[in-house]
Image: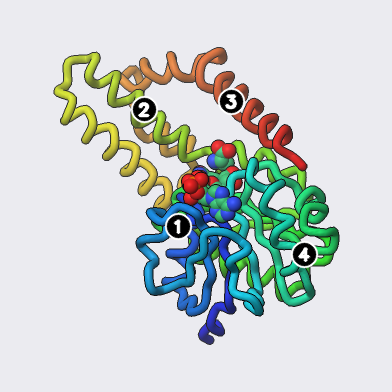
Amino acid sequence: MTDSPLPPLLLIGCGKMGGAMLAGWLERGLTEAVVVEPNPAATAAFAGRVTVVDNPAAIPPGFRPAAVVLAIKPQEAAATLPTLAHLVGPETAFLSIMAGRNVAGMRTALGGAAAVIRAMPNTPAAVRQGFTVAFPGPGVTAAQRGLADRLLSAIGEVAWVEEEGLIDPVTAVSGGGPAYVFLLAEVLEAAAIEQGLPPDLARRMARATVAGSGALLAASPEDSAQLRKNVTSPKGTTERALAVLMAPEAWPALMSKAIAAATDRSRELAG
Ligand SMILES: NC(=O)C1=CN([C@@H]2O[C@H](COP(=O)(O)OP(=O)(O)OC[C@H]3O[C@@H](n4cnc5c(N)ncnc54)[C@H](OP(=O)(O)O)[C@@H]3O)[C@@H](O)[C@H]2O)C=CC1
Ligand SMILES: O=C(O)[C@@H]1CCC=N1
């Protein structure tokens, strides 16, 4: 069975995440979209394929999207959402990927009755390997949830939760997670240089090691702990490194503290 074509969409904010999602939807056959984005460089790659306007007042009158996707920074929400209130209606779902902003706050800013889905994707969306967790707010119909699922599936895997509070730790773990992995590549490269390896080789090694390990993790049925054990020869070199990294005050404690800090920040951005 083939999917029906994607319905008309309105994208608010076409930066790193909005642009990655739009590219995924165009690959899935999106034919009608209006994009609100003040920065012309951000939409250059989509020229001729979507209608671009630089502010909500310029959205073509009469344009009735099936979904309005909110991909602006959380700090822009208070000023921008009220300008979209005229689009609220039974035919239109709002899909937000803004960190922290909660459904109740968005509904209030939109005038009270909007069907709002709150989702948290991540940047591997740019290569269609993202992971998104979504929460359906009050009044979201099965069809609107189905549309959101299709839109988010265009950029990777999707999971749904029925408790909105879970989106805050999701934001900390998978939303921000790619940054921690890229930091690993950075510090691995720096440590390699410290041990005398040429910078170019250090860079290639660090990138390939992180990327190759991710590909192995994705392809293997084994869990991550077993894949780690597969590298760790008894009385070998990796064992020495892991004794440092896995000390209780090292990575286990640091990661727990980091995720708690990011979760708290997501809660602070509520409203
Ligand atoms: N980056 C990430 O890893 C993730 C981000 N998110 C969430 O996605 C959202 C966007 O993040 P990200 O893509 O990184 O940010 P970006 O800054 O890359 O994108 C936001 C875009 O929106 C534009 N913009 C600013 N004001 C408006 C407005 N009023 N109307 C329309 N567009 C506007 C910005 O233009 P200009 O640059 O000129 O201000 C920019 O191009 C955030 O809410 C973030 O929390 C969610 C998951 C992961
Ligand atoms: O750092 C942030 O706030 C956003 C949300 C998750 C990833 N980037």
**Residue drawn 28% across and 32% down?**
206
Between discs 3 and 2, the one toward the N terminus: 2
- The image quadrant that residue 185 belongs to is top left
Mark 1: amino acid: Ala
Q: Which residue is mark 3?
A: 258
Q: Could you say whether the residue bearing mark 1 is in a helix, strand or loop?
A: helix
The residue under label 2 is 232
Comparing 52 with 251, the one in front is 52
Which marked residue is nearer to the observer: mark 4 or mark 2?
4
Measured as percent of width and height from the top left, residue 220 is found at 41, 50
Residue at 62%, 56% (x, y): give it.
70
CA–CA distance in space, label 3 to label 1 = 26 Å
Marks 1 and 3: in contact by CB < 8 Å? no
* Circle nearer the N terminus (4, 1): 1
Q: Is residue 21 left or right of residue 74?
A: left
Vertical order, 149 against 163 (above or below)? below
Position of 207 with respect to 104 (left or right) is left
Question: Closer to the observer: label 3 or label 4?
Answer: 4
Which residue is disc 1 drawn over?
Answer: 20
Q: Label 2 is placed on what type of residue?
A: Thr
